[in-house]
Image: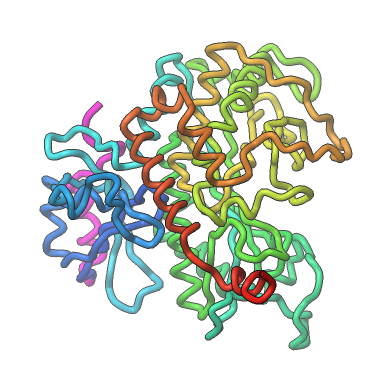
């Protein structure tokens, strides 16, 4: 395995410039270990070198904290002189940036070492590695992502506020949740239309949009594809579109897992089906009744359930991620599964045998999609290989009164489970797991060392 997945060729650049000769600058972007897009802007005249041979970029570019700082504990960056790696463009991601006033384009890139081998610093390469065991079994997955986010009101305050919809015909801010209220979409109609127009221009297969369980919270879905890396490319680029278009329209947009204590958190839900070489859905093979759940489904769900706890540091990678993990909020707290039930971790949506799938509902919208997907593929392969038993299924319509918590719901606990995992180093790469652990432990320590206003509000006078 060499080079990057779906590497672009120079003829793509020539075709783009023939169609858009007015472009003057190019933003070269790639996801870091957190899923945050990093990069730089270069003159379009330098793009030929990027597409022909690749260009150099510092290796620490993808190993930054959420604040964009290096981790001294890694021995990378200022300590080792920050040696260069090679970045090369990804096919079909050279597109215009419509929300900018300048004539600027963007391209997503992947990273290899200078010898052309995939760099473990690039999370696309980690997902590529995690895909291989299923491919070796002759299996192909079809996946789609769903992203929830908040539109934010323009404000000079340090505390963000959701973009509350107005009661139609008034300036009154709407009270209550109003889930899937189409009138709520009217208040941000221009924004939503612009997002979908921009997605068309950037080859992103956006589909449905609806209001979610809190004011200002929306969900925009992406169409399923048979390439997990491409699906994650779509996810990170859709987040960029939403943030860029929101800024153009005078809003903010956030994918924080829990930006408001009193409102619902935002999740990254992933739908996944598994097909054999004949195109048969193995999740339904041998299944009878409705839904036609076969042995493949049970084993895949069993593997996802067995590995869920050790993967929580990937599904919930930040301090704020754990504020989302609360009872009675459609956020799973244990690895259960069920048909047509949104209260479980692994939901089996209503569908026919051909489209039978698993909806993985654990990750927050702040998670790195590539690493979330890698963990899911690991769990499915582990389950199929070892014929894991998922236990009893939560039946449709079951009233959920059992809020037993078996998944780690604190950052340090999740990292401790990650560090004890025997499977993750095998599927994702041992050195990558070491790096990820150091980065997240370090950021956790930095976060805990900060003294917040809440410390003073609770303890300054009282103790």
The residue drawn where x is 84% and y is 30% is 395
Task: Let me know if residue 10 is in the magenta part.
Answer: yes
Q: Nearer the viewer, residue 9 or 179?
A: 179
**Quarter of the image containing the N terminus?**
top left
Q: Nearer the viewer, residue 14 or 194?
A: 194
Q: Nearer the viewer, residue 322 or 276?
A: 322
Apparent side of residue 70 relative to residue 180 in the rendered image (left or right): left
Apparent side of residue 261 relative to residue 73 in the rendered image (left or right): right
Rendered position, 65 above or below 369: below
Q: Residue 13's image quarter? A: bottom left
The residue drawn where x is 41% and y is 38% is 229
Q: Residue 437's image quarter? A: top left
**Image position, residue 446 (x, y; %):** 43, 57
Q: Residue 308's image quarter? A: top right
Q: Nearer the viewer, residue 43 or 62?
A: 62
- Residue segment shown in magenta: 1-22
**Image position, residue 29 (x, y; %):** 30, 56
Figure disc tally = 0
The residue drawn where x is 34% and y is 39% is 435
Rendered position, 232 above or below 383: below
The residue drawn where x is 50% and y is 72% is 246
């Amino acid at each position: 395995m060499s080079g990057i997945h779906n590497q672009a060729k120079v003829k793509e650049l020539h075709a783009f410039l023939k169609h858009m000769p007015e472009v003057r600058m190019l933003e070269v972007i790639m996801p870091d270990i957190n899923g945050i897009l990093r990069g730089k802007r270069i003159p379009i005249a330098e793009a030929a070198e990027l597409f022909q041979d690749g260009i150099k970029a510092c290796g620490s570019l993808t190993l930054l904290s959420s604040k964009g700082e290096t981790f001294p504990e890694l021995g990378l960056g200022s300590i080792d002189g920050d040696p260069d790696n090679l970045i090369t463009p990804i096919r079909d991601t050279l597109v215009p940036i419509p929300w900018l006033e300048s004539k600027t384009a963007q391209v997503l890139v992947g990273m290899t070492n200078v010898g052309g081998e995939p760099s473990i610093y690039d999370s696309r390469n980690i997902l590529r590695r995690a895909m291989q065991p299923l491919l070796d079994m002759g299996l192909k997955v079809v996946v789609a992502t769903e992203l929830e986010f908040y539109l934010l009101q323009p404000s000079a305050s340090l505390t963000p506020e959701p973009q509350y919809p107005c009661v139609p015909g008034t300036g009154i801010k709407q009270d209550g949740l109003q889930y899937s209220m189409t009138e709520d979409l009217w208040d941000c109609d221009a924004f939503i239309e612009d997002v979908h127009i921009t997605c068309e221009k950037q080859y992103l297969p956006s589909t449905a949009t609806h209001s979610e369980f809190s004011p200002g919270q929306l969900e925009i879905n992406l169409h399923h594809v048979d390439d997990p890396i491409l699906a994650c490319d779509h996810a990170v680029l859709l987040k960029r579109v939403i943030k860029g278009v929101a800024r153009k329209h005078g809003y903010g947009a956030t994918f924080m897992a829990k930006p408001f204590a009193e409102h619902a958190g935002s999740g990254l839900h992933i739908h996944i089906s598994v097909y054999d070489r004949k195109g048969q859905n193995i999740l339904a093979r041998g299944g009878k009744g409705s839904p036609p759940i076969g042995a493949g489904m049970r084993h895949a769900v069993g593997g996802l359930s067995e590995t869920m706890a050790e993967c929580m540091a990937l599904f919930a990678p930040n301090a704020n991620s754990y504020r989302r993990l609360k009872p009675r909020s459609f956020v799973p707290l244990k690895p259960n599964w069920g048909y047509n039930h949104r209260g479980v971790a692994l939901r089996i949506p209503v569908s026919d045998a051909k489209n039978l799938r698993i909806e993985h509902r654990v990750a927050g919208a702040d998670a790195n999609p590539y690493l979330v997907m890698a963990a899911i593929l690991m769990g499915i392969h582990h389950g199929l290989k070892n014929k894991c038993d998922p236990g009893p299924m939560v039946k449709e319509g079951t009233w959920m009164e059992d809020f037993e918590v078996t998944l780690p719901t604190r950052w340090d606990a999740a990292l401790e489970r990650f560090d004890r995992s025997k499977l993750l180093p095998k599927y994702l790469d041992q050195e990558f797991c070491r790096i990820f652990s150091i980065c997240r432990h370090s950021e956790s320590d930095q976060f805990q060392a900060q003294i917040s206003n809440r410390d003073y509000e609770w303890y300054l006078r009282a103790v």
